[in-house]
Amino acid sequence: MTPRARRTPGSDRTTIQDVAAAAGVSVSAVSKVLRDAYGVSPQMRERVTAAVEELGYRPHSAARTMRGHSDTIGVALNGLTSPFMTEVATGISEALEPTRYQDIIVSAGSSPAAQQNRIEALLDRQVAGLVLVAPWIDVTWIEKTARTVPVVTIALHGSSENFDTVVDDERLGAQLMVDHLVSLGHRHIVHTSMPPAFADSAFVLSHTARRQGYEKAMLDRGLEPDIIETWYSEEGGYQAAVRALDRDTPPTAIFAGADIAAFGVLRATEDRGLRVPEDLSVVGYDNIYTSTMNRIALTTVDQSGQVTGAGAVRLLLDRIAGRAEPEEFVVSPQLKIRRTSGPPRSRNH
Amino acid sequence: MTPRARRTPGSDRTTIQDVAAAAGVSVSAVSKVLRDAYGVSPQMRERVTAAVEELGYRPHSAARTMRGHSDTIGVALNGLTSPFMTEVATGISEALEPTRYQDIIVSAGSSPAAQQNRIEALLDRQVAGLVLVAPWIDVTWIEKTARTVPVVTIALHGSSENFDTVVDDERLGAQLMVDHLVSLGHRHIVHTSMPPAFADSAFVLSHTARRQGYEKAMLDRGLEPDIIETWYSEEGGYQAAVRALDRDTPPTAIFAGADIAAFGVLRATEDRGLRVPEDLSVVGYDNIYTSTMNRIALTTVDQSGQVTGAGAVRLLLDRIAGRAEPEEFVVSPQLKIRRTSGPPRSRNH
DNA sequence: CTGAAAGCGCTAACAA
DNA sequence: TTGTTAGCGCTTTCAG
């Protein structure tokens, strides 16, 4: 029962061989018990379980993986800094809790090349499935990848062939917000956005869907869309606000594409001594924690990161189990009216 | 039945064998080129590289791992919700960028059992090293683990034997804050903390170090420490503030152990119509993004998550390279004086 | 119901 | 300098 001389690193590791020897059974028996495979007698199960317990045995993940048995789900985020991202990640982890899968997260960065690189690294690790959150990557590449491994994307709007998608209904969310502002009396509403991720594609990322929702909602009400393209960041929001407020006829409301950008807008109003919402209504999208604080009280749109993450997991597990037709899971947004929006001052007429 | 008929192991994957065949050389030659090992002729290198390129070959990570060649660093966080955590994680990723290692992150949860479980899962994946951020785990277990795999902890204060530590000098940070408040004229300063992680141990986690720093600083100035133990959360801060303000002689300043708790304190002041800092100074620790906003402008202590993460990587790589003696890397905190702290109202005597 | 044995893709002796 | 080959720890036919 002495395993032959080991010479590799990690020589003190308990292997399935050790367990088999201790239990006085074959390795395949141990393997079967471990995997709950069919055809093991209760007493065999018991002996093995006891040996596993006693030796503190844990299966070698890489060895399993080599036989095509990965129980790892890879999650690629394009950064940990956005609270929505982390909420999604938390939702994924929680949804995976009761399953045999565990997730590993990589922060993939925002450049397409870096993201692709990190995702390939995940693939090299033979993940059982992939969740791509707001992938800033050519969709044909995703389609190709999805033919090899189950994939579900989050925040990518469009009809996929080989992977599933989970999206917030951002067109609706943007519409809710425009409705809110219009009902307050606003006519000139600026939206801050950022450049589309894909040049010519049937797919768009969240921010573009928000922008489209805004455009349509404005047009539907006979109002003229007014979009300023910067970036979803505090500074981006600030820049956009400066540009909007420098105009001859500044807007009465600024609808930032993201809460973080709305904070930049807020900073611009403070710089100029404008009161919110009396002089300018400022609203966002995402409902991150900071927005809920009493001193901020930003009117925004909430999309549950928890629900989003959990939906992605459900779809992914389905797909791992064999489903091949693409599915889409749509999360409903919810308007959160707080104190940064109000009726415009009737400044003229 | 097998649900995953799609990916028969070996069917569509390009292996090192394929590359060898395509290049007309042996597998070991390919392996050597891939690993930049000694003893390959330039022309061999070129042929192999060309074949790798053409076939789009990528090494199978699990197979490498089985030969003891992991290039994965595991990072265990006890949650993604704390901005400091994510900043550290970002720092780690960035510091790993130029190396051959890549990090994978697991959100380990806050219960010791769950954390241990997730860390073991990382170990099963044969990581080359481990970064444990604020591990809420029995240190003897960490010591034991660290004898098997290189480990560095973040936010764990104490002298380790088998692993390295990166800490913010939180005792100093707390002292800076007490100094600041005292110099403003405060005498009665309440500190909000949370229960120590370890019952009897030479090790303490950040929050306990902050508390110790506060206690010592108060005592050094002949002032009486006044600690309320709740939790580092908005609600925890709120509860602590309620208890402090309900006293016969309420404090003139509350030093929350974390910014997030300070926000709860702020909410309590709003509930009671207290002005900050006129009626009460409120300060925190961490300098998270929200605290920097103009509308919050929380006085706090900054500890760079970037520097912390990068420090952890440096130590870990050193240790992987062979260093055995434990090292400690101390990050200096910095006081950020903003608008929630000011002189106490001279209400009486 | 149980066990022997053949690999999974790769690295590292060891030979040539 | 290059190639051959024996495993790493596990799963999985396929016999017993």
Image (cartoon, coloured by chain):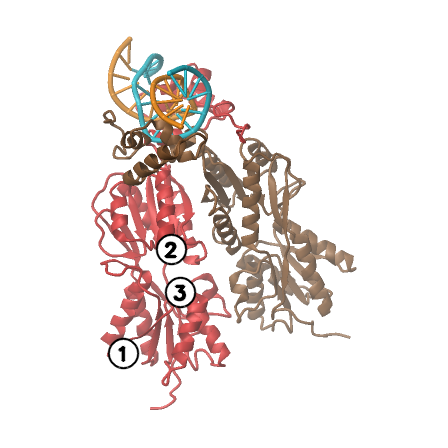
Chain colours: A brown, B red, C orange, D cyan
Q: Which of disc 3 and disc 2 is earlier in sequence?
A: 2
In the rendered view, tell whether residue A227 sits above or below residue B44: below
The quarter of the displayed image where residue B214 is located: bottom left
Per the model, the C-alpha gap separating discs 2 and 3 is: 15 Å
Q: Amino acid at mark 3?
A: Tyr
Total numbered circles: 3
Q: Amino acid at mark 1?
A: Glu
Judging from the image, mark 2 belongs to the subunit labelled B
Per the model, the C-alpha gap separating discs 2 and 1 is: 33 Å
Residue in front for this viewpoint, B92 or A29: A29
Tell me, for residue B224, which label it has, or none: 1
- The residue beneath circle 3 is B232
Whether residue B19 is visible:
yes
Q: Which one is in front in this view, the residue at disc 2 or the one at disc 3?
A: 2
Residue at x-position 33% and y-position 74%: B180
Tell me, for residue B111, which label it has, or none: 2
